[in-house]
Amino acid sequence: MSTPSPHAATAAALLPLVGGAANVTSVAHCMTRLRLGLRDRSLVRDDAIRALPAVLGVVEDDTYQIVLGPGTVARVTPEFEALLAAAPPEAATPSAPTPAAALAAHGSALRAARKERNATPFKLLLRRVANIFVPLIPALIGCGIIAGLGGLLINLGWLPSLTPALTAIASGFMALIAVFVGFNTAKEFGGTPVLGGAVAAIVVYAGVAKVTVFGTTLAPGQGGVLGALGAALLAVYVEKWCRTWVPETLDVLVTPTLTVLLSGLVTLYGLMYAAGEVSTAIGTAANWLLSTTGAFAGLVLGGLFLPLVMLGLHQALIPIHTTLIEQQGYTVLLPILAMAGAGQVGAALAVYVRLRHDDSIRTTIRSALPAGLLGVGEPLIYGVSLPLGRPFVTACAGGAAGGAFIGFFSMLGDKIGSTAIGPSGWALFPLLKGDQNLAVTAAIYAGGLLTGYVVGFAATYLFGLGAAAETVSTVGGVCDSPMGEPVRETVGQEGDRTP
């Protein structure tokens, strides 16, 4: 009998801990997290999940998110889905005895109330935007790395017969990214995905060069992903409007035709022009910001990114990154924002040095640090800096310093960017691109990382822990945090600590 793979074993261990197959309503994954929709949150055994060797942390938002790390999550998810498909329909974990069930139900109600308070229209909109763009990130990363490899070969003069093929492979997705955005937009907002993709395809069709709007001839791709998003969203509303009055016998003919026709005309004679102006303004503003106020802009962006991530507001930057990549070939914002992770790593190293008697938190840092160096910050955020309080603030200081470093060089004309979104930390090196040669670009980015590490470490070592550094308790106890507040901690096998 063959031994199951580690990923299959992880999936098999997770399923009963989230309440069994009958408790799972949806399964998806992003770059690092397995995202589960659950019927009854009270059936989940959080501590046991955190104790699994493959689990780096747990985050609860609109879905239950299990942090597994890049690569691992993409392999565990299909194994998990296979277990769900094989489970009998009646398979469900029995509910707990009555007193425990009552406590669990009370906790579930509190979580639901907190989620409802946090579900503001703006945050819900940002989640929907993320649902549109996050599935595109793997293709952006793959094509970005291939584009970087092709550029390197061109600069070195190597394999001239191969570089055109690499360029075609890397550019194909970006040339049609509007179609994918339109497809995902319609899917997210309740329309027919292929109709959203059909309308968005107008944006990149070469024939739009024959259309004149406001005395100006349209250009293929004008408006980019923003135009595609607007076109597909309009198509969703037109489709829903058609279904309110078109007879069922004619629906299959009339609704798709009117959806594509009406949305397409508005896209050509309004949205493409307007979205083009907005896209141009975004690119101009980003370039002006870094070339004029680079050091200050970098300080602010690098220092505030961790709080933005905690609030979920970083999702608003995804369309901006994508627009810049589509326009300029790279986003100048991502390397600056990546400095927040460098500050986090520096802060974690300082905690490791100062809390030399706390074996549990040192275990947490040892297990989470490799992921942090590669740009996966959740284990360090939720397992180290956030529960301790002040180290989260000093990590932001490190991010601000690193961002200011890169911003300063942007003011000098040495802009650096990333050809894709998603990775950060050391994982961003293969995606770097700028207006200087690759060696200079990589050196500036490395200098920013080093600055973030050093300032994050120094700020945390000197100001982030204080006298409480020697009195932080070990596993499972109640301690006084450096913020002066009692913190109850639970620690899993991999050291994940949550307040």
Image (cartoon, rainbow, N blue to C red):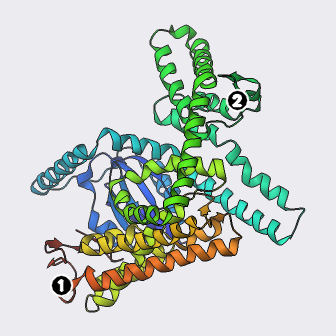
Assess disc 2: are there few (<14), some (14-19) or many (≥20) residues with their C-alpha within 10 Å of its C-alpha: many
Q: Is residue 58 found left or right of 442 in the rendered image? A: left
Front residue of 98/41: it is: 41
Secondary element under disc 2, as helix, strand or loop, is loop
Secondary element under disc 1, as helix, strand or loop, is helix
* Residue 274 percent across, percent down from the top left: 56, 31
Q: Is residue 207 found left or right of 382 in the rendered image? A: right
The relative height of residue 123 versus residue 266 in the rendered view (above or below) is below
Amino acid type at circle 2 is Leu
Closest to the camera, between mark 1 and mark 2, is 2
* Residue 377 percent across, percent down from the top left: 42, 68
Q: Is residue 342 found left or right of 325 in the rendered image? A: left
Q: Which quadrant is home to the C terminus?
A: bottom left
Q: Which mark is residue 197?
A: none
Q: Is residue 159 found left or right of 261 in the rendered image? A: right
CA distance for labels 1 and 2: 64 Å
* Residue 390 percent across, percent down from the top left: 25, 74
Q: Which residue is mark 2?
A: 218
- Mark toward the start of the polypeptide (1 vs 2): 2
Please report the residue visible at 50 percent of the width from the left and 80 percent of the height from the top: 450
Please report the residue visible at 44 percent of the width from the left and 48 percent of the height from the top: 316
Q: Which mark is residue 468?
A: 1
